[in-house]
Image: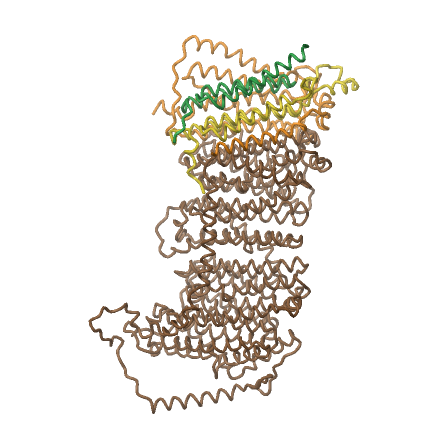
């Protein structure tokens, strides 16, 4: 097993993390957790960007997509409600 | 020359600085904002001027590199127009919005400015990803600004709009990225070339993603739900700003993108989605109860129409400038309507009853904007639609034309339905309104004035100085509402007389179809305006509009081109509509009148399009049309003119329109306007009748149908006239019936038939004008139109009595007066043609006509005088003068029919190559069936009548004089007073006999048509559930549906 | 063995799918915004993946001699991924955060009007 | 029901999009990209080609992007301009340690951000990334001290002037070489791989960094504080 295929394995893992985190963001009923899940997905994607030879994009995604976005989501959740309740 | 780049850079720099400038105070912010927009107007206007003068299109590079390496922008004529429009709208919108919010916020100003930048960027950029960026700017600007003013509804609508917009931008971005991957470039022009070279597998799906994204951005069906909510929920002033900036810019963006779709399977999808939007949005709009929601549907429909046209622009069938006219028209009119909606403030359509009752200027603005919206001349939309239709006709797309016209008719229904409500309560609503600031009305005034640039095209199409001058004086009169009504009537009289003077002897000759109708029109107009000296004008703008009407008719008659004819026809339609609606109860009948006239107009337009598709440009060229084209053109034209003439089957609009019109206008409506379809039949339709007939060969004669339509009209309307209890309604039915006779005469297509018809045209003007004027005088004095409230007026109004007497004798077509010659000629023509059944039918209906003629004079003038009318005076002198102006020609014609028949003979001989009528001596006519000596008959009749009178006076029982209340009750409950009147239900026995015929199948049919379309609209609009997620789902389903259809090919 | 970028494309499509499904199925407003954010990330990943080539380096040229040596430059430039999609994504990310912020501001305001985050509460305007 | 339809529709859509994978497969650089790669160095003298594209070749996009951010911040402020019914963001006061820590971290973080955008033309990262880092420094302060009142006026001036500077740089290009945001003939391109090289690119990227940083800071500020600043005195 050479380095290349190891990296591929890592890729595969990260991709799985991305999708699982995104799924968690979609399904978790606590909004704060959902936001954090989305942030994790974004952070994982920024790693993928690095792997795709896009360091600029990776930095931006990490700083803005994962960092700032998450913060404003958290602010919004704090200013509304923290659980996902539907009313009938 | 200022670089076009500054059109973007300057407002953007200002937007960045505004938060700092605001520290100096809100006034500074406003001044800088307005100055920036003014700068934009000047620069864009300057560029437009140069480009229109032939300057080269400006290409702007960025980054220092030529495309495709750098992003480039372009400013050509189309772009300059749109940029100027955006700046203009933004400027006026800034004025309007300045005081619309309680607490103004500098951020609102910033967003307004950036919105303009976004729109201009979209318009000018030639780069696909740059387009995406500016789409986002426009989108975010829109989302942010819709909460302006009205918080709650704006929030809901804005959120839905944002949700769908975000889905759309995902689609667009995916499309753009894949297109880059596919072609290696982002420059639009570069990409279009590369795409067409290699249509790679999968490119269809990519273009589909972009297409669906753009459909959502363009607010087309089925993705227009949130946009319509936006119109409903947001401050109308904001929507006006968006219409002028973002909406146009997105449309132009898509227009640029159509280059990518060339040769792909989606071209048809664009066409279909566009047209579906136009028809469906217009259909759903007819059931809207809220003004702004209705306007939203209308906007969606208009965008649909524009998008529909784009593929035809690509293929060269339609000029880009045509679409440009429609864009400009929509922007100006819709923005004006939205501002008006904001000023009025009432959301419910029914709350608009009597809107702007005390603000005539705004009302004029509303009417102008509505006329422009539905595509009536002289406003730019009309010319745009016309040229678009011509393009479609030439390209051979009759079905698209049909659907387009149907959609346009729906537009008539809801826009004039709106005006109906506005006109409805105009008399009752005069409360004090809050004072308006000039900043609020600047937009309405400015944009409606700008709409008048279409007049330039009107001048080209008409080429008639007289007509334009008349219309111009009319416009001045509309605006100069301070001039008292009677003085305005005098101006009208002078203007019409001057026109007649100018045309005298050249165009005003009886031996020519045009000249004959022109004479009828000008004479009728003079008589009516003379009468107007004695009656109050129904509305301040009445005489101005009347003059516009006369001008349009003159143009219609004088013009040689099909376009000029139709432009005149449509102006005639809307100006007469306004006049009908100007009486107290006129708004409803006027609405019906307009809808049917609109339908008639579209039938005529369809016919003209068939002709234009066959390469015909002028009226004279119509004769070159042959074969199936001739037949379908003839059929459409004949049907259109028949509807406008209120022929049986489409007559339901007429009685109410005639009856509820202002008393001043009914004589003109009946005597003159009803002759214009006859003009159309005789000059336009008849030109292609021969090839139409020969196309069908011996099998079938299409004119026979027209003849029966005329015959049925004559019979049916006469019959209905008999049972009316309302003097004007009676005359109305009679009038329509008489036009039926004329149609019948023309349909005979023989010299004799035409002579009869044209003779009747003149005669009908004279006697029906006379009768309506006389009745107008009676109604003015008595204050009612019901027979039951008249009676015995012979002593109080003797001059009017004589008028009516002469009128009904002429009408009944009995000797000795002029009507007889007409009927006699008609019977002969019918027999000559061998249509004996029709002849008998017509004779029968002439007999029925006696009944209502008698009714008219008996119920009004004979019998007992009501006590309340004991002091009634004769009608005002101008009215009487006008009547006697009509009596004189009737008497002259009765004695010397040849004075009219001779020129008619020449006319007919011109048309048919021969005339079968010969004249012997001054007053004798000879035809194949016998001869007719007017003097001899006159003498005979007078002798007979005098003899009868002497007999009655000497031999008959004396009449007993009783008081009007000389009625004995025998303990029973008395019925309502009007039923006790001697003239009540006069012909009830006949009514019972004819019951099966009269049941009103026709009105039931039209009611069903209306009900069914409303039911469809009601069921259909539930499609817009109001739920944001459903709207997103529609977007996905649209992708799948189109993919299923398009990719399967 | 993965020869191309299928893994990234599939992940990107998966993100888009999850994001849009959240937008259409979850009735909570904040969840919808999260959905958009996730879908945006997916789109960005997809675009970068479009410009990627196996075994090539980031679009940074760190050798001054290339300025004069055109032949080497040609060789080097054949070993670089496409910079354009990256540039586009930089723009798209920033735009995305802007839209997200505005959406969340809307959500905060909508919550203030109804006291609920249920999207079906905000469908009064219809038909 | 609707959920099921949505799910199925989306699944079908995803399958449909998967058909695009062959197009997404690596091929070769397109004509425009190869131009950037082979000429970018000469034309802009910047090592980081992404920066060359972002600031020069597609600089107009970036101006648009900055505009989007500016517009979003204005929009958020506009949407949240009214107080009625808004839930106030209450927060326990942070402990002394956190406050102090945040203040200590503030300066280095800002410096780090500045470093990123100053070197945008040479190394990965640039205005956006640096700006985001600067904003996160501001975020630290906000988190640490809720009652902190940002120097709004200064922030506003920074926001306005950096944006204005960006446009101005574009106009200078327009005036000097007839092309908006052009990079030749204004500042010498300089020596490769120096801080002061690549012509106007670093200038613009610094302006972008300042703009993005101040903008994102303003965004955070407005999200946290908008519409409850009045609460204190009413």
Q: Colour of chain A?
A: green
Q: Which chain is brown?
A: B
Of D208 and B495, the residue lying toward us: D208
Of B931 and D5, the residue lying toward us: D5
Color scheme of the displayed model: by chain
Q: Which chain is yellow?
A: C
Pick the quarter of the image with the N terminus of chain B: top right
Pick the quarter of the image with the C terminus of chain B: top right
Residue C12, position as x, y percentages in the image: 59, 24
Instruction: Give above or below for D233 relative to B149.
Output: above
Instruction: Give above or below for D49 relative to B125.
Output: above
Q: Which chain is orange?
A: D
Instruction: Give above or below for B278 relative to B460.
Output: above
Residue B46, position as x, y percentages in the image: 62, 43
Residue ranking furthest to the right: C71
Residue B218, position as x, y percentages in the image: 56, 40
Instruction: Give above or below for B403 relative to C119.
Output: below
Q: Can residue B228 be seen here?
A: yes
Residue B85, position as x, y percentages in the image: 56, 43
Of D27 and B516, the residue lying toward us: D27
Residue ranking furthest to the left: B971
Residue B322 as seen in the image, left or right of residue A40: right
Q: Can residue B521 be seen here?
A: no
| Residue A44 position by quadrant | top right
| Residue B683 position by quadrant | bottom right
Count the marks: how many?
0
């Amino acid at each position: 097993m050479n380095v290349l295929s190891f990296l591929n394995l890592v890729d595969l893992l990260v991709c799985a993390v991305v999708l699982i985190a995104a799924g968690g963001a979609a399904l978790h009923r606590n909004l704060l957790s959902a936001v954090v899940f989305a942030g994790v997905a974004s952070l994982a994607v920024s790693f993928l960007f690095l792997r795709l030879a896009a360091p600029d994009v990776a930095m931006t995604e990490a700083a803005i997509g994962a960092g700032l976005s998450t913060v404003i989501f958290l602010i919004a959740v704090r200013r509304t409600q923290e659980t996902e309740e539907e009313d009938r | 020359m200022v670089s076009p780049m500054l059109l973007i850079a300057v407002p953007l720099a200002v937007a960045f600085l505004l938060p700092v400038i605001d520290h100096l105070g809100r006034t500074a912010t406003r001044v800088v904002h307005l100055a920036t927009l003014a700068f934009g107007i000047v620069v864009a206007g300057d560029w437009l001027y140069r480009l229109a003068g032939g300057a080269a299109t400006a290409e702007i590079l960025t980054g220092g590199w030529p495309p495709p390496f750098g992003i480039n922008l372009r400013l050509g004529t189309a772009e300059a127009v749109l940029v100027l429009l955006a700046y203009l709208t933004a400027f006026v919108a800034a004025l309007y919005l300045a005081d619309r919010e309680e607490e103004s916020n500098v951020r609102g100003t910033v967003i307004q400015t950036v919105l303009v930048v976004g729109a201009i960027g979209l318009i000018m950029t030639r780069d696909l990803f740059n387009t995406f960026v500016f789409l986002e700017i426009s989108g975010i600007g829109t989302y942010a600004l819709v909460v302006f003013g009205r918080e709650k509804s704006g929030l809901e609508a804005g959120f839905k709009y944002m949700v769908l917009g975000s889905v759309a931008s995902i689609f667009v971005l995916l499309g753009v990225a894949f297109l880059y991957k596919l072609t290696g470039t982002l420059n639009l022009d570069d990409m279009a070339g590369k795409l067409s070279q290699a249509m790679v597998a999968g490119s269809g799906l990519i273009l589909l993603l972009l297409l669906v994204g753009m459909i959502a951005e363009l607010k087309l069906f089925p993705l227009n739900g949130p946009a319509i909510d936006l119109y409903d929920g947001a401050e109308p002033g904001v929507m006006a700003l968006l219409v002028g900036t973002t909406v146009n810019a997105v449309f132009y963006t898509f227009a640029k993108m159509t280059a990518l779709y060339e040769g792909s399977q989606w071209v048809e999808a664009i066409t279909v989605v566009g047209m579906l939007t136009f028809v469906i949005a217009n259909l759903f709009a007819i059931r809207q109860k809220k003004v702004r929601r209705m306007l939203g549907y209308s906007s969606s429909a208009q965008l649909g129409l524009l998008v529909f046209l784009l593929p035809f622009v690509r293929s060269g069938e339609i000029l880009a400038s045509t679409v440009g006219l429609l864009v400009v028209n929509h922007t100006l009119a819709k923005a004006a309507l939205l501002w008006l909606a904001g000023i009025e403030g009432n959301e419910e359509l029914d709350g608009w009853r009597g809107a702007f009752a005390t603000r005539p200027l705004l009302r004029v603005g509303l009417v102008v904007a509505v006329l422009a919206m539905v595509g009536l001349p002289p406003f730019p939309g009309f010319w745009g639609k016309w040229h678009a239709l011509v393009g479609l006709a030439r390209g051979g797309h009759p079905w698209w034309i049909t659907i387009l016209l149907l959609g346009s008719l729906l537009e008539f229904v809801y826009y004039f339905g709106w005006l109906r409500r506005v006109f409805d309560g105009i008399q009752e609503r005069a409360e004090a309104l809050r004072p308006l600031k000039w900043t609020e009305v600047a937009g309405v005034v400015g944009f409606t004035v700008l709409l008048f640039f279409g007049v330039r095209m009107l001048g080209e199409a008409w080429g008639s100085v007289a007509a334009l001058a008349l219309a111009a004086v009319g416009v001045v009169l509309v605006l100069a509402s301070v001039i008292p009504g009677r003085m305005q009537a005098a101006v009208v009289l002078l203007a019409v007389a001057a026109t007649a003077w100018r045309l005298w002897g050249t165009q005003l000759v009886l031996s020519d179809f045009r000249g004959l109708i022109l004479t009828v029109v000008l004479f009728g107009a003079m008589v009516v305006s003379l009468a107007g000296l004695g009656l109050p004008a129904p509305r301040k703008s009445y005489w101005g509009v009347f003059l516009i009407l006369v001008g349009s008719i003159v143009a219609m008659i004088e013009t040689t081109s099909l376009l000029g004819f139709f432009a005149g026809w449509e102006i005639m339609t809307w100006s007469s509509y306004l006049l009908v609606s100007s009486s107290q109860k006129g708004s409803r009948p006027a609405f019906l009148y307009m809808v049917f006239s609109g339908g008639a107009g579209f039938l005529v337009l369809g016919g003209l399009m068939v002709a234009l598709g066959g390469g015909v440009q002028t009226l004279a060229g119509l004769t070159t049309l042959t074969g199936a084209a001739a037949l379908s053109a003839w059929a459409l034209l004949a049907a259109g003119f028949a509807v406008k003439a209120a022929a049986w089957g489409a007559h339901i609009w007429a009685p109410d329109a005639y009856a509820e019109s202002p008393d001043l206008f009914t004589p003109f409506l009946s005597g003159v306007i009803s002759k214009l379809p006859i003009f159309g039949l005789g000059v336009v339709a008849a030109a292609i009748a021969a090839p139409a007939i020969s196309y069908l060969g011996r099998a079938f004669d299409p004119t026979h149908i027209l003849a029966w339509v005329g015959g049925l009209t004559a019979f049916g309307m006469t019959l209905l006239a008999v049972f009316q209890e309302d003097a004007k309604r009676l005359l109305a039915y009679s009038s329509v019936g008489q036009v039926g006779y004329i149609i019948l005469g023309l349909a005979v297509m023989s010299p004799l038939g035409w002579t009869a018809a044209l003779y009747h045209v003149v005669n009908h003007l004279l006697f029906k004008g006379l009768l309506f004027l006389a009745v107008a005088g009676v109604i003015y004095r008595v204050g009612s139109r019901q027979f039951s409230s008249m009676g015995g007026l012979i002593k109080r109004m003797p001059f009017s009595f004589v008028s009516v007497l002469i009128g009904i004798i002429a009408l009944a077509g009995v000797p000795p007066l002029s009507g007889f010659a007409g009927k006699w000629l008609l019977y002969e023509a019918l027999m000559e043609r061998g249509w004996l059944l029709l002849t008998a039918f017509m004779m029968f209906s002439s007999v029925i006509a006696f009944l209502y003629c008698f009714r008219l004079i008996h119920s009004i003038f004979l019998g007992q005088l009501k006590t309340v009318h004991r002091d009634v005076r004769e009608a005002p002198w101008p009215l009487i003068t006008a009547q006697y102006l009509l009596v004189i020609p009737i008497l002259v014609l009765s004695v010397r029919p040849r004075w009219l028949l001779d020129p008619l003979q020449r006319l007919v001989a011109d048309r048919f190559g021969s005339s079968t009528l010969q004249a012997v001596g001054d007053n004798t006519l000879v035809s194949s069936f016998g001869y007719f000596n007017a003097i001899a008959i006159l003498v005979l009749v007078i002798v007979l009548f005098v003899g009868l009178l002497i007999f009655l006076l000497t031999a008959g029982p004396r009449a007993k004089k009783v008081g009007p209340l000389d009625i004995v009750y025998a303990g029973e409950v008395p019925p309502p007073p009007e039923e006790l009147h001697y003239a009540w239900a006069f012909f009830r026995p006949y009514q019972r006999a004819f019951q099966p015929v009269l049941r009103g199948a026709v009105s039931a049919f039209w009611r069903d048509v209306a009900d069914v379309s409303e039911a469809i609209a009601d069921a259909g609009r539930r499609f817009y559930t109001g739920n944001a997620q459903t709207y997103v789902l529609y977007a996905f389903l649209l992708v799948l549906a189109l993919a299923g259809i398009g990719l399967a090919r | 063995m993965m020869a191309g970028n299928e893994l990234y494309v599939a992940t990107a499509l998966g993100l888009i799918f999850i994001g849009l499904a959240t937008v259409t199925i979850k009735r909570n407003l904040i969840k919808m915004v999260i959905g958009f954010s996730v879908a945006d990330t997916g789109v960005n990943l997809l675009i970068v993946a479009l410009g990627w080539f196996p075994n090539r380096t980031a679009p940074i040229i760190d050798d001054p001699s290339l300025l004069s040596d055109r032949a080497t430059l040609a060789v080097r430039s054949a070993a670089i991924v496409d910079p354009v999609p990256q540039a586009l994504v930089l723009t798209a990310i920033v735009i995305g955060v802007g839209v997200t912020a505005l959406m969340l501001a809307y959500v905060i305001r909508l919550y203030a009007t109804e006291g609920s985050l249920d999207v079906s509460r905000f469908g009064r305007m219809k038909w | 029901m609707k959920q099921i339809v949505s799910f199925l529709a989306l699944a079908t859509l995803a399958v449909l999009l998967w058909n695009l994978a062959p197009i997404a497969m690596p091929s070769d650089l397109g004509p425009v990209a190869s131009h950037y790669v082979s000429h970018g160095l000469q034309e802009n003298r910047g090592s980081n080609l992404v920066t060359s594209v972002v600031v020069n070749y597609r600089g107009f996009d970036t101006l648009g992007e900055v505009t989007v951010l500016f517009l979003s911040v204005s929009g958020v402020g506009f949407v949240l301009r009214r107080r009625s019914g808004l839930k106030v963001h209450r927060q326990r006061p942070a402990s002394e340690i956190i406050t102090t820590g945040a203040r200590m971290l503030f300066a280095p973080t800002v410096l780090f951000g500045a470093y990123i955008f100053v070197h945008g033309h040479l190394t990965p990262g640039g205005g956006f990334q640096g700006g985001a880092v600067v904003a996160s420094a501001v975020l630290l302060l906000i988190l640490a001290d809720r009652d902190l009142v940002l120097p709004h006026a200064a922030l506003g001036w920074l926001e306005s002037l950096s944006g204005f500077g960006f446009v101005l740089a574009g106009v200078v290009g327009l005036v000097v070489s007839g092309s908006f945001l052009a990079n030749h003939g204004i500042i010498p391109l300089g020596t490769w791989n120096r801080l002061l090289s690549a012509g106007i690119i670093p200038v613009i990227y610094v302006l972008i960094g300042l703009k993005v940083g101040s903008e994102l800071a303003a965004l955070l500020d407005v999200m946290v504080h908008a519409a409850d600043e009045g609460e204190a005195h009413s």
